[in-house]
Structure formats: C-alpha cells, structure tokens
Amino acid sequence: MSSNEASPIGIKTLDEALGGGLFKGSLTLLEGPTGSGKTILSALFLYYGAAVVGEKGIYASLSLSKKFFYSYLKTVNMDFEELERKNLFRFLQFPTVVSKDALKEMVELMLMEFIEFKSERLVIDPINPLLTILSKIELRAAVHNVLKKYLERYEITGIIVADTAKGRLDPAYREIEFLSDIVLLMHSKVVNDNRVFRVYILKYRGHEIKKHIVEFTIKDIAQVNY
Ligand SMILES: Nc1ncnc2c1ncn2[C@@H]1O[C@H](COP(=O)(O)OP(=O)(O)OP(=O)(O)O)[C@@H](O)[C@H]1O
Ligand SMILES: [Mg+2]
C-alpha cells in the first residue's frame, strides 16, 4: 500500500503497524472500556489529519460537549479551536435521540454537512446510544448500506467508537466487528504513575498486520509534532 492511500493516525509505531495508517475510505471500529483512550486516539486521528496531512475532519459527538472536547484535548496539545478557524475541522454535537425518526433526521443532517464541508476524515464517538434504538437488522443496514457505502464513495476514512463494559463489544452487537474493515481494541493501565495505552489490532481487512499490539503513553500523544 502506498502512503497516499493511507490516512495516518499520528502515532508512528501504530501507523507503522498498520502499514501507513487506516486505508482511505475504510471504516474502523475502535472499541474498549471507559478511560482506555478511545476519544484521545480518535481526536488525534482528526487533529493530525488536519494539521499535518491537510485532510479536513469532522467529529460527531454523541457524548461530550464542544466546549468540554476543546478544552480536554488542549491538555494534550490539540488546539481544535484553531483548526476550526482555519476551516479544517468541524464539531457536530448530537443530542441523545430516542426515536428512529429523530435518528434518521440526525444522520441526514450529518451526511449533508459532510458533503458540504468535503470532509476526508470522520469520527462518531460513541455509537452506543444508537445501539439501543436500532434492532440488529436496522443496525446492519445503517452501517452496511449507509455509512460504509458513503465512506467508500467519497473516500472518507471513518472511525466509529464503541464503549464496552470490559473488553470487546457485547456479543449481541458483535456484527459491527464483521462489518468494519479494521477493528482496534484499546486498553489502558497505569505503570509508575504513567498511563500506558495498548491497542490490539484485531482485524485489518485485506492488509498485512505488521505488529498486533502497540503501546504508547499520554506523553507520546502530547508530544506529537504538528
Ligand atoms: N492531559 C492528560 N494527562 C494525563 N492523562 C490524561 C490526560 N488527558 C486524558 N488523560 C487520561 O487518558 C485516559 C483516556 O481518556 P479518553 O477520554 O480517551 O478515554 P475513553 O476511552 O474515550 O473513555 P470514555 O469511554 O469514558 O469516553 C483517561 O483515563 C484520562 O485520565
Ligand atoms: Mg471517550
């Protein structure tokens, strides 16, 4: 795979393990328990993409507010306000939806925003509220017929984040792993007062996985060169 077909995340060791990054137009499932680093890693994917690679990004939040997200990521040297000013980044805040109609409206709004903004990277964090609204077949249709098709057609590299109780997604929702091109599982632990993040590359469809486990620290994230 040549590097221009990959969307690097910004952590050198992780990108090397992935053969350059996440391939363009792919869908990645990033799963793991609370505090395992999912938001920080997916934010880095957008920040590095915009600030270094020059690829516009959108963060669709189903949890954190824009204010909290911006000040949270500033603690690890990602200034999303500046990216927004340069028209390289947009934050979309979605309310918790309780009906399928409201969800449909929300998805349509999101897709329109992408088309207009010409985003090349997308993060939806987290998808859990959607899991409770949709039946298994509806979830499959939403991921397979809408999201994946859209990412492929417009060559947008997408990450969907899933909060899990312990390790991987509940077996009832495991189909999302099959539908995703890439599956990354995160864990974190504190070693000598340093938080160490561990990413297991569970699947990379059609690509060689050069290394299956990659570790990095909060310092590695904070010291990325933009
Ligand atoms: N500036 C910082 N310095 C040190 N540790 C930090 C800093 N920012 C975040 N962390 C730690 O990094 C960890 C990962 O945070 P992150 O928000 O990415 O987790 P998450 O997997 O998205 O969790 P959740 O499921 O609750 O959304 C947290 O445990 C947090 O304490
Ligand atoms: Mg999070």
Image (spheres, rainbow, N blue to C red):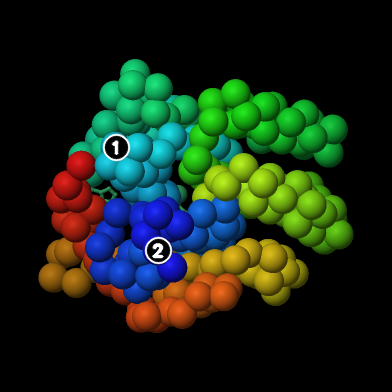
Residue 86's place in the image compared with 103, above or below, is above
On screen, residue 103 versus residue 77, left or right, reads: right
Q: Which residue is mark 1?
A: 51
Q: Is residue 181 visible?
A: yes
Instruction: Give x and y (percent) for residue 208.
Output: 46, 80
Q: Residues within 10 Å of mark 2 (few under 14, many from 20)?
A: few
Q: Earlier in the sequence, mark 1 or mark 2?
A: 2
Instruction: Give x and y (percent) for residue 166.
Output: 51, 70
| Residue drawn where x is 26% and y is 68% of the image | 13
Residue 137's place in the image compared with 226, above or below, is below
Image quadrant in which the N terminus is located: bottom left
Residue 148's place in the image compared with 98, above or below, is below
Q: Is residue 125 visible?
A: no
Instruction: Give x and y (percent) for residue 97.
Output: 72, 35
| Residue drawn where x is 49% and y is 60% of the image | 23
Figure quadrant of residue 161: bottom right
Instruction: Give x and y (percent) for residue 98.
Output: 77, 37
Q: In the rendered structure, which amino acid carries the disc numbered 2?
A: Ser
Observer-nearest residue: 208 or 131? 208
Marks 1/2: CA distance? Answer: 21 Å
Per the rendering, the mark at residue 2 is 2
SS for dot 1? helix
Observer-nearest residue: 179 or 135? 179
